[in-house]
């Protein structure tokens, strides 16, 4: 075994130990994490969640139950998204990144986020206040999900999800905005995540830095 590969294995062993010991609770496998009530106030109230996504999450014709696919990049969230999209009652659109690129961002950045959502999801948000810029984060997400649901034209769909790995860093905010939303976390072996990240053209990193990214996401998930 080469020295560099042996050092990589030592690093991942230590990263795994750090990820498992830096959390106060590790109850994720038995249910959703216990989110704290601490949240930086956004400029909009939390009580204006549109009816397109109901808190009850019922099976009515116009009700949608939001859920969120989270996990580190290259962990398999896209594969899980593809699998879930084959279910007649579920649809998961492309990544919205609303919490990473819209939440508490300046208007010019919000505008770019809205236009990207329109392009990636194949929907229009121009009828929203400020062409989608002057709305709450919750409203933008729910409108995006509900309009994508209408686009797929499957009346049987009652669960619409959001798949964005970056949203793993906003679990508390999501839980506050969507108290009845559900989280689906996918965990992949850290070495395999780092190796996959090291081959991505949109990210310049080696195994060590890729492993650090994986360990960071594990801490966010409470492991």
Image (cartoon, grey):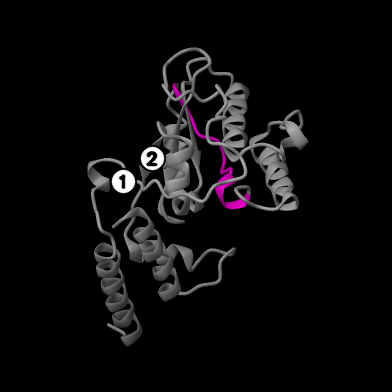
Q: CA distance from mark 2 to mark 1?
A: 9 Å
Residue shown at 41%/34% (left/top)? 179
Q: Is residue 97 magenta?
A: yes
Q: Nearer the viewer, mark 2 or mark 1?
A: 1
| Mark earlier in primary sequence (2, 1) | 1
Residue 183: image tag: 2
Above-or-below relation of 191 to 109: below
From the viewer's side, name the closer residue of 50 and 61: 50
Residue at screen point 41% across, 51% down: 71
Look at the image and give the residue range highlighted in magenta.
89-101
Where is residue 144, by image quadrant?
top right
Secondary structure under badge 1? loop
Which one is nearer the viewer's eye here, 68 or 103?
A: 103
In the displayed image of the protein, which residue is found farthest to the bottom?
A: 3
Give residue 103's position: percent from left, percent from top: 60, 48
Q: Is residue 137 above or below residue 60?
A: below
In the picture of the structure, the residue carrying the numbered disc 1 is 33
Find out whether the residues at labels 2 and 1 contact each other: C-beta distance under 8 Å.
Answer: yes
Q: Which corner quadrant holds the C terminus?
A: bottom left
Lateral position of residue 194 relative to residue 140, left or right: left
- Residue 201, image x, y percentages: 58, 64
Q: Is residue 8 above or below residue 107?
A: below
Which of the image's four quarters has the N terminus?
bottom left
Which residue is pictured at 56% across the width and 66% down the height? 203
- Point out residue 107 in the picture as x, y percentages from the top left corner: 73, 49
Q: Would you call the spot at circle 2 few (<14 residues within 10 Å), some (14-19), or many (20 or more)?
A: many
Between 223 and 174, the one lying in front of the other is: 174
Q: Position of residue 41 (x, y in %)?
A: 54, 47
Q: Quadrant of residue 125?
A: top right
């Amino acid at each position: 075994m080469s020295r560099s590969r042996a050092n990589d294995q030592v690093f991942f062993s230590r990263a795994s130990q750090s990820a498992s010991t830096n959390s106060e609770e590790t109850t994720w496998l038995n249910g959703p994490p216990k989110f704290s009530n601490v949240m930086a106030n956004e400029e909009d109230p939390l009580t204006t969640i549109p009816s397109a996504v109901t808190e009850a999450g019922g099976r009515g014709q116009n009700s949608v139950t939001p859920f969120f696919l989270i996990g580190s990049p290259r962990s398999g969230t896209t594969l899980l998204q593809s699998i879930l999209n084959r279910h007649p009652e579920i649809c998961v659109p492309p990544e919205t990144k609303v919490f990473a690129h819209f939440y508490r961002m300046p208007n010019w950045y919000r505008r770019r986020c809205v236009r990207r959502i329109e392009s990636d999801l194949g929907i229009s948000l121009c009828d929203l206040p400020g062409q989608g810029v002057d709305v709450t984060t919750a409203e933008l997400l729910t409108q995006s999900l509900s309009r994508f649901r209408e686009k797929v034209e499957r009346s049987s769909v009652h669960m619409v999800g959001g798949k964005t790995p970056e949203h793993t860093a906003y679990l508390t905010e999501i839980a506050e905005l969507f108290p009845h939303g559900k989280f689906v976390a996918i965990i992949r072996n850290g070495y395999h995540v780092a190796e996959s990240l090291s081959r991505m053209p949109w990210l310049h990193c080696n195994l060590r830095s890729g492993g650090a990214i994986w360990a960071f996401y594990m801490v966010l998930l409470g492991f």
